[in-house]
Image (tube, rainbow, N blue to C red):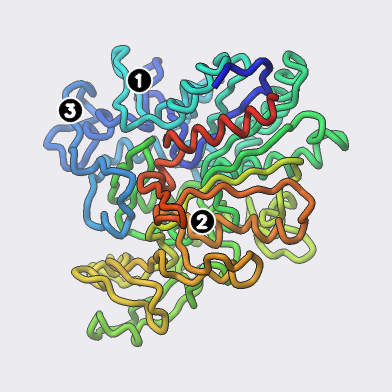
Amino acid sequence: MSKFTKHHPVILFPGIAGSRLKTRKEGKQDAHPLWFNSIVLAGMSESSSNDASAQEVDDFTFPASSIVESDKTEADLQGIGVTPSKTWQEHMKLQADGITPKKEANGGEKFNREVEGLEGIKNVSYPLLGLKPDEKSDYYQALVDKLKANGYQENVDLIGHPYDWRVAPGGLERRYQTFTNLKTKIEELYTNSQLPIVLIAHSMGNRVVQYFLKWIETNASEGWVDKYIERYIAISPPWIGAPQAIYRLSDSPIVLPTGKSQVALKGMKDVLQSFSSIPWLLPLQDQYFNTESFGYYKDGEFYEQDLSRYRAITMQETLVKVDAQNTTLKYQTDFYQNDPLITDQTAKKIGSELIKCPAVNKLDVIYSTGFETPVGAYYEYKGLEENKVLTIATNLGGKNAVPYPHRDDLTIKKGIILETPATKQQIEVEVADRAKLQNSGDSVVPYGSLTYFKKWQKEEPNRHIVGHEFSAQPTSDGVQYPSVNHNAIVAHPDVITKIIKLLSESNA
């Protein structure tokens, strides 16, 4: 492909855990990598026999068992992982306001924050001593390289937009002036190029873009979007949320993306519950997730494989049982229910503004399908009476996956309910062309959430709202993309080619 002769500037938005974070050590003045540095995390592991807080990071090697390929789901990884030390966890936590890091630096500069620009998102890891990061930690690197090969210039017409992914949208504006600064940057790019901007977001980065576009309606003149935004390319968007955000708040092991790979972590309940961003990802409605409930609870002693004895519990009940009343539930009210840019203040149905189509002229949705994807979980209490904690019932479907009751197209693996390529999708039945009723999501976001844009297509047939699907299952012409799931999709060469093609349409 020839280089573009003119460039609509591009801004890249990462997903959750897709921005590098930096902090200060106790008594130190220099910036120190916090997320993600595999050596630092390993050195701070509880499993280490050394006192990590007193050691230099170069003394440690990361346990390979905790770095896993992105094609593994959390159901596959239950029981695997490393428990970061209390020191590392304290630096990752937010204070009770859900905005300010617990380890706030003294003085004017807020140093427990994201690494700025493209350096904060091309690779999630931190290259020590000038070394190139591990290829597994590449995130937007491959796309950046391809864009530069087509004539884009880093930090001129190709901009990275990291953000503190621990913080709710209202908190991002209060602490960092995120949306005010983004508006200014877009206007500067437009002034320099005399061309409107293309926004490209991955995963939760789409929530950032959605919020920004709503924020613009209140804080900019009418017609601002038409003037300054050329196109919005949404990759792996959780349009109506992801059920796995619920069980990540329990005491169960979780995985977080680190570019092309994932890191499996234990003991993260208190850390994740301190993040006011988590409610941003909670499911907004249930009809397109195919399950009767997002959670089931083992109440009492009985044969654990007897699914009829598990009681269905609501998302709110689950959050109470994981002791999130003063964290996630409070944040849900303060930052989401009470924010008019997220929730219509008349109806008060949380997220009612989030499920509306973004107000841009051109919306392209890039997503992958055909992977086992979480849509709910079974829970049980573990531990002594005085220290009981709610965890995923990993023995349920632990050795052999079991079918979900009354649905032979869903399965239960290690306590997590999964949709599969055989799952009948309600959104296809109701609003789509019914060409392929059976399908599944991208291993993180369920199919009904990824493809919610099909409702917008039906509601606004004359508007440019186009989906671009990359399936792990063979298509009618035999094409399949097995390594293009939620975390890997940004770096997949065929996806990058699609993005370049979309940009060339705008740049022609």
Separation of marks 1 and 2 at Cα, in angstroms: 32 Å
Q: x, y percentage for residue 123? A: 40, 27
**Location of residue 427 with respect to 4 vertically, above or below:** below
- The residue type indicated by label 3 comes to Phe
Classify residue 506 as left or right of residue 243: right
Q: Which residue is mark 3?
A: 60
Separation of marks 3 and 2 at Cα, in angstroms: 34 Å
Separation of marks 3 and 1 at Cα, in angstroms: 21 Å
Residue 27: which numbered mark, if any?
Answer: 1
> Which image quarter is the N terminus in?
top right
Earlier along the polypeptide chain: callout 3 or callout 2? 3
Q: Tag 3's secondary structure?
A: loop
Residue 276 visible in this rendered orientation of the protein: no
Q: Tag 2's secondary structure?
A: helix
- The residue type indicated by label 2 comes to Thr
Residue 495 visible in this rendered orientation of the protein: yes
Which callout, 1 or 2, points to the residue nearer the camera? 2
Q: x, y percentage for residue 199? A: 64, 33
Q: Which residue is mark 2?
A: 328
